[in-house]
């Protein structure tokens, strides 16, 4: 799997006409069947924040900051539960263990599930 880049973000934004973009492999693929729903929603939250507020590094890879207030608010709405930075950090740890995200310092990079 490749990390999302500017071209991927642009393509997803063109394709998305919903309030939130949810990559179907995350919920439909057998690969992720044992992943907790909260962790899946954390991936979706990071992706949707990235679609709206992506930052780009020198290689044009898209990322978001792990302390983004928008990330907390998006996950609260998606998961319909109380969320704070500590919970998000735990979800990100799980996503990293699953090789769905990569963290470099405070930057969160996502792997593209649509490949």
Image (cartoon, grey):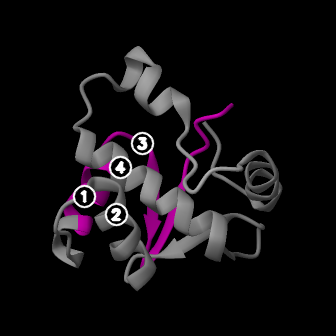
Count residues near mark 1 (Cα–Cα under 10 Å), then give few for <14, some for 14-19, many for 20+.
Answer: few
| Discs 1/3, front | 1
Q: Residue at x 81, y 58 (%)?
A: 10
Left or right of 64 in this view: 54? right
Q: Which residues are magenta?
A: 88-115
- As helix, strand or loop, the secondary structure at mark 4 comes to helix
Res. 18 in view: yes
Residue 71, x across and y down, in percent: 41, 73
Mark 1 or mark 3, which has the lower sequence index? 1
Residue 80's mark? 1
Q: CA distance from mark 1 to mark 4?
A: 10 Å
- Nearest to N terminus: mark 1 or mark 4: 4
Where 8 sits versus 30, above or below?
A: below
Task: Determine the secondary structure under disc 1.
Answer: loop
Instruction: State yes or no: residue 93 in magenta.
Output: yes
Q: Residue at x 39, y 15 (%)?
A: 30
* SS of the residue under disc 3: loop
Q: Quadrant of the C terminus?
A: top right
Q: Earlier in the sequence, mark 2 or mark 3?
A: 2
**Residue 68 appears in the picture as rendered:** no
Left or right relative to 36: residue 112? right
Label 2 neighbour load within 10 Å: few <14, some 14-19, many 20+: few
Instruction: Please tell me which of labels 4 and 2 falls first in the chain.
Output: 4
């Amino acid at each position: 799997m490749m990390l999302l880049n500017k071209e991927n973000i642009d393509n997803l934004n063109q394709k998305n006409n919903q309030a939130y973009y949810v990559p179907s492999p995350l919920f439909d693929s057998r690969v992720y069947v044992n992943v907790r729903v909260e962790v899946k929603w954390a991936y979706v939250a990071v992706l949707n924040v990235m679609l709206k507020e992506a930052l780009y590094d020198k290689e044009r890879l898209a990322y978001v900051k792990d302390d983004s207030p928008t990330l907390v608010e998006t996950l609260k709405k998606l998961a319909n539960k109380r969320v704070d930075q500590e919970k998000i950090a735990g979800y990100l740890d799980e996503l990293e263990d699953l090789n769905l995200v990569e963290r470099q310092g405070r930057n969160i990079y996502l792997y593209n599930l649509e490949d």
